[in-house]
């Protein structure tokens, strides 16, 4: 079980011992019969603590993010934000401090600014493309977490995971990498020195825009123990059917990502040559400031692109309403292409903050449709 695609299809998913079912059953159940008090038949007691469908997903996630690392532990959650919240409660105390990206996903920023800060965890936004800026934002003795996204949402900046792991560890902090944009097929942060990987499985892992979920993976046994405790004690777990949907999506992650990446390359090349577009952000472009770091730590450059419309904010908003193959909508990472205006949609909660995004920016989640249909659609929308 060495290859990524083999693990995606089989890890944690032996044929059902009772029936031989090839696909992990949806164990739609809350409680389990005991043979005498405390006599658990299969280790299961109550489905908030553990459920066999969720266990299969968790084992598969651990195998994808931490191949070969002993003690790798995967945990599934009801959403990406539930995973993030559980992680912060498990590793931080009131009075602690975190360094976060100055272009973090809007929901992550809101969690830090509106939920974690009143609870007593404060934060400093820093440019994570610059390890020295991160080192300068660390408060010795108080900083417990350096939080990284790479590529970032929506600006597609690239952070050097190995360099930031050194910066975090030198200060006694842990490095958390939100690996949602890359997925474990393109990038495996735990192998580069990160302590925890966080995911919105809603996106590429689920891959079909039909489920909301989250995940954490770590190979540190003490951290794993605390996370398992908090997963059960806080209770924001996914149900069996949602776990099954993510598990099913993961089986095709490799082939989907290959097509997302090749379609994105063609779309990025088209946008670069278009007169109505002033700037294209895609880490696969040699002109992208993070291109070399991305080449070093990623297998390919992903399916997310953002670009600036030369005529400004209103033109960007208008073009988002004119596509027909690209669906106007939030979220990303599904088989279908999506277009959105981050400043008014996904990142509206960052308005007026240091994380406000440019108003002329359009974000694409390039899907796996026929690439010429995608390019023609954008060409028509840009023409007005
Ligand atoms: C969507 C997203 C999240 C939040 O995940 P939910 O499943 O929506 O709670 C976190 N990080 C990134 C990068 C995301 O795109």
Image (tube, grey):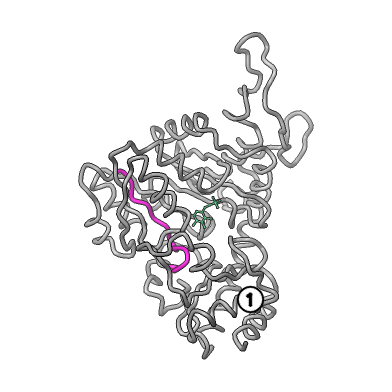
Question: Viewer-proximal residue, 287 or 298?
Answer: 287
* Residue 295 in sight from this viewpoint: no
Quarter location, residue 100: bottom left
Tell me which residue sits at (25%, 61%) in the image: 133
Specify whether residue 153 is painted magenta: yes
Specify whether residue 183 is painted magenta: no
Residue 267, percent from left and from top? 58, 78
- Single out the residue that lies furthest toward the top: 36
Question: Viewer-proximal residue, 222 or 328?
Answer: 328
Q: Which residues are magenta?
A: 144-156
- Single out the residue that lies furthest toward the right: 19
- Residue 339, placed above or below residue 112: below
Q: Is residue 261 left or right of residue 327?
A: left
Residue 348, percent from left and from top? 49, 63
Residue 17, percent from left and from top? 73, 30
Tell me which residue sits at (57%, 52%) in the image: 3
Q: Helix, strand or loop at disc 1?
A: loop
Number of marks in the rendered image: 1
Quarter location, residue 293: bottom left
- Single out the residue that lies furthest toward the bottom: 275
Residue 344, percent from left and from top? 52, 68
* Residue 340 in sight from this viewpoint: yes
List the residue tagged with mark 1.
Answer: 321
Quarter location, residue 60: top right
- Residue 99, placed above or below residue 314: above
């Amino acid at each position: 079980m060495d290859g990524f695609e083999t693990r995606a299809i089989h890890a944690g998913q032996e044929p059902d011992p009772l029936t031989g079912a090839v696909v992990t059953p949806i164990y739609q159940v809350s409680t389990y019969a005991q043979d005498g008090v405390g006599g658990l038949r299969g280790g299961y007691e109550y489905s908030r603590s553990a459920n066999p469908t969720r266990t299969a997903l968790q084992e598969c996630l651990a195998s994808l993010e931490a191949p070969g690392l002993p003690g790798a532990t995967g945990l599934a959650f009801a959403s990406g934000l539930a995973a993030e919240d559980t992680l912060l409660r498990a590793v931080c105390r009131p009075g602690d401090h975190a360094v976060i990206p100055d272009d973090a996903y809007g929901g992550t920023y809101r969690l830090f600014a509106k939920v974690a800060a009143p609870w007593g965890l404060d934060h400093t936004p820093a440019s994570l493309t610059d390890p020295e800026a991160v080192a300068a934002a660390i408060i010795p003795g108080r900083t417990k977490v350096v939080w990284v996204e790479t590529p970032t949402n929506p600006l597609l900046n690239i952070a050097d995971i190995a360099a930031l792991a050194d910066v975090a560890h030198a200060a006694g902090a842990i490095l958390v990498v939100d690996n949602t944009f890359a997925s474990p097929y393109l990038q495996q942060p735990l192998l580069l020195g990160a302590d925890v990987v966080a995911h919105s499985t809603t996106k590429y892992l689920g891959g079909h825009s039909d489920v909301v979920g989250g995940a954490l993976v770590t190979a540190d046994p003490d951290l794993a123990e605390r996370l398992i405790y908090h997963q059960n004690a806080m209770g924001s777990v996914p149900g069996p059917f949602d776990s099954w949907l993510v598990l099913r999506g993961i089986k095709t992650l490799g082939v989907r990502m290959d097509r997302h990446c090749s379609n994105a390359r063609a779309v990025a090349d088209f946008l670069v040559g278009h007169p109505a577009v002033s700037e294209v952000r895609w880490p696969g472009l040699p002109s992208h400031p993070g291109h070399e770091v991305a080449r070093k730590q990623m297998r390919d450059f992903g399916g997310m692109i953002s670009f600036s419309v030369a005529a400004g904010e209103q033109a960007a908003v208008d073009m988002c309403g004119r596509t027909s193959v690209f669906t106007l909508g939030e979220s990303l990472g599904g088989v279908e292409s999506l277009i959105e205006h981050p400043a008014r949609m996904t990142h509206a909660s960052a308005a007026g903050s240091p994380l406000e995004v440019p108003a002329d920016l359009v974000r694409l989640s390039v899907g796996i449709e026929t690439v010429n249909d995608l390019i023609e659609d954008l060409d028509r929308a840009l023409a007005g």
